[in-house]
Amino acid sequence: MPALTDTYVSQLQHQFGERLLQLGDGLQALREAGQGDAIVLLHGIGSGAASWLQVALGLCPQARVIAWDAPGYGQSAPLPMARPRASDYATRLADLLDALAVERCVLVGHSLGAMIAAAFAQRHPARVSELVLLSPARGYGARPEQGQAVRDKRLHDLATLGIAQLAEARSARLVSATARASAVAWVQWNMARLNPTGYRQAIELLCGDDLLRYREQHVPCQVHCGSADSITPADDCRALAQALAAPFHLINGAGHACAIEQPETVTGRLAWALDTSFTGSVQ
């Protein structure tokens, strides 16, 4: 298992390398590979750009694959406000895509990244050819009492466990019971690289905002979820898809971290979204 993780790290360095851009409010980190039509990948609350490695390597022969480290993650500067909303992250994303000269893309959001993706697509519909939400987290903005409880617990766990122990304790929950040990290890590797400041801001986003605030979409949207997802269960994701008037698709046997546990399946579905959204053809 450590040897496989070492292989992934080597692939990150040589095939999905990191770039740092100076934007108006600070540094922004991203990883990029390939050329062609753009697909932009937004990670969830306990992860980072590197989590998309295997999907990126599968897509880069046909597309320009861009994955950011969200504000406050990796070497990306945090947002200036203590309690950001999805629209604040969407503003940073717009600045990043401007700097990369990306006028239009397939936009993919996983978990909490789905809320940011939905906010961006609502604000900039002409820049999104297809919105793909993987195991979307709705957030607790419309359920303040539940949101306060989640916020208190996450901040308590961060304070008492620290990032490394938090990653060790939570990583197995993000995949199915039948996931390979290498998938659990890669989830943990990514989670162990969280920055406390960025993680706290993301907790505020999770607990203070609601994906359904961004339900008015003028771009095609689709929702996918692992059948074994215990973090954003399939029934919840199906209900979100219905509220968004979007088709819903299960990823059989996958847990929450579907792009790590089943990268081939996720790659295939994103390749199909790329093909249909930019060319109109069906494979």
Image (spheres, rainbow, N blue to C red):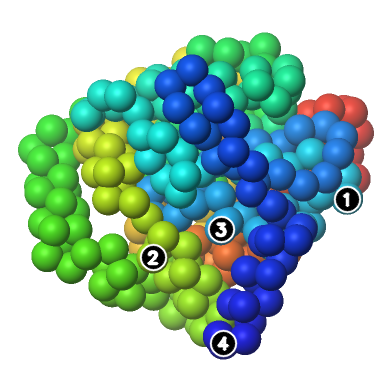
Circle 1 SS class:
loop
Circle 3 SS class:
helix
Q: Indicate the position of residue 269 as horizontal and vertical percent values.
A: 72, 50
The residue carrying pointer 3 sits among few (fewer than 14), some (14 to 19) or many (20 or more) residues within 10 Å by Cα, namely many
Q: Which residue is mark 4?
A: 1
Vertical position of residue 174 compared to residue 268: above or below: below
User: Horizontally, is 92 left or right of 230 in the view?
Assistant: right
Vertical position of residue 91 compared to residue 200: above or below: above
Residue at 52% x, 71% y is 186
Q: Is label 3 or label 2 in front?
A: 2
| Contact between labelled residues 1 and 3, with CB atoms less than 8 Å apart | no
N-terminal of the two: label 4 or label 3?
Answer: 4
Q: Which residue is mark 1?
A: 61
The residue carrying pointer 2 sits among few (fewer than 14), some (14 to 19) or many (20 or more) residues within 10 Å by Cα, namely some
Q: Amino acid at mark 3?
A: Ser
How much space separates mark 2 and mark 1, taking CA atoms? Answer: 30 Å
How much space separates mark 4 and mark 2, taking CA atoms? Answer: 16 Å
In this view of the protein, can residue 92 be seen by the observer? yes
User: Horizontally, is 160 left or right of 54 in the view?
Assistant: left
Q: Amino acid at mark 2?
A: Ala
Q: Amino acid at mark 1?
A: Pro
Vertical position of residue 172 compared to residue 235: above or below: below
How much space separates mark 4 and mark 3, taking CA atoms? Answer: 16 Å
User: Horizontally, is 27 left or right of 58 in the view?
Assistant: left
How much space separates mark 3 and mark 1, taking CA atoms? Answer: 19 Å
Q: Which residue is mark 2?
A: 192
The numbered dot on residue 51 is 3
Quadrant for the N terminus, please.
Answer: bottom right
How much space separates mark 3 and mark 2, taking CA atoms? Answer: 12 Å
In this view of the protein, can residue 238 be seen by the observer? no
Q: Is label 2 or label 1 in front?
A: 2
Residue at 13% x, 33% y is 144
